[in-house]
Image (cartoon, grey):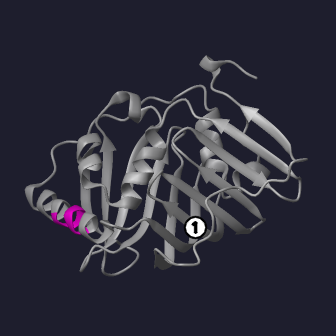
Amino acid sequence: MKRGPGFVVEASVWWGVMAAAMAQPPQPPQPPPLDPAQQERADRLLDLHAARSRGIAVLVADYVQRRTTALAKEPLESRGEFLFVRNPGVVVFRATAPRQSVTRLSAATYEVWRPQKKQLERFHLDGPELANGLFAALGGDAAALRAGFEVAACTDDPTVAGRVRLRLVPKAAAVRARLQELEIVLQGKDAQLAAVAYRDAAGDRIEIELNAVRIDPKDAPSAALDVPADANVVEHRPKSGGTR
């Protein structure tokens, strides 16, 4: 799959690139041991984030996604409504700009519904690593984050006062082949989640900023895709699994 300008600008594209990528760039080395003061601060914030997130079943927010890639001079931006369901793990992006689309990510599949085309594109992921990393960051699963990642940095956000950025690097080489690094942006005073970012296998950096966060709202949107029976469904499977 090639990343043309019309493809990368959509809110869903980064998951499609990950699912379709066949060749992986050289993996970055493991980071050196973290400064003890940074490690202590990171541990405290991860524990606070876990405590705040404990018991949350559904999170709804307005989102702004910015993708920084060598293929574009400026970051590519999209926005809309964001939904995270803890169990089973699902993330849904309902993009309103630059064009309408609905993206649904689970541990096994990434699906994009484009209503203008009446087309559902479904990518069968060759591993759950990227999805599970995102779910752990959003859900404040400190145990899973500590088990799978090393803290590479814990620093004040240079762009927004009061925020702290925790940069995590996967411990396992198999995970680093799909997810080079994961970043969690928290409010320093209370560890409220502000954004999640990651660097994908192609080296692109994607940040998802969350605003107007609603916890377990009674009017939460459905995590299911509303796709008509006559929609055109396009399936993509990993190379090792063949094509159907």
Q: Quadrant of residue 197?
A: bottom left
Q: Residues within 10 Å of mark 1 (few under 14, many from 20)?
A: many
Q: Is residue 130 toward the left or the right of residue 151 in the image?
A: right
> Which residue carries the number 1 mark?
82
- Prevailing SS of the magenta stretch: helix
Secondary structure under the numbered disc 1 in the rendered image: strand
Residue type at mark 1 is Phe
Residue 242 lies, with reference to residue 205, above or below; the image says above
Which range is magenta? 44-48
Q: Nearer the viewer, residue 222 or 137?
A: 222
Name the outermost residue toward the left: 36
Q: Quadrant of residue 96?
A: bottom right
Q: Can you give x and y, in whole percent of width and height, for residue 149 in the image? A: 28, 44
Q: Is residue 238 toward the left or the right of residue 35 in the image?
A: right
Q: Can you give x and y, in whole percent of width and height, for residue 64 in the image? A: 58, 70
Q: Is residue 82 toward the left or the right of residue 2 in the image?
A: left
Q: Can you give x and y, in whole percent of width and height, for residue 224 in the image? A: 66, 56
Q: Nearer the viewer, residue 54 or 104?
A: 54
Q: Residue at x 66, y 66 (%)?
A: 78
Residue 19 lies, with reference to residue 137, above or below; the image says above
Q: Residue at x 31, y 50 (%)?
A: 168
Residue 153 lies, with reference to residue 59, above or below; the image says above
Q: Residue at x 17, y 59 (%)?
A: 43
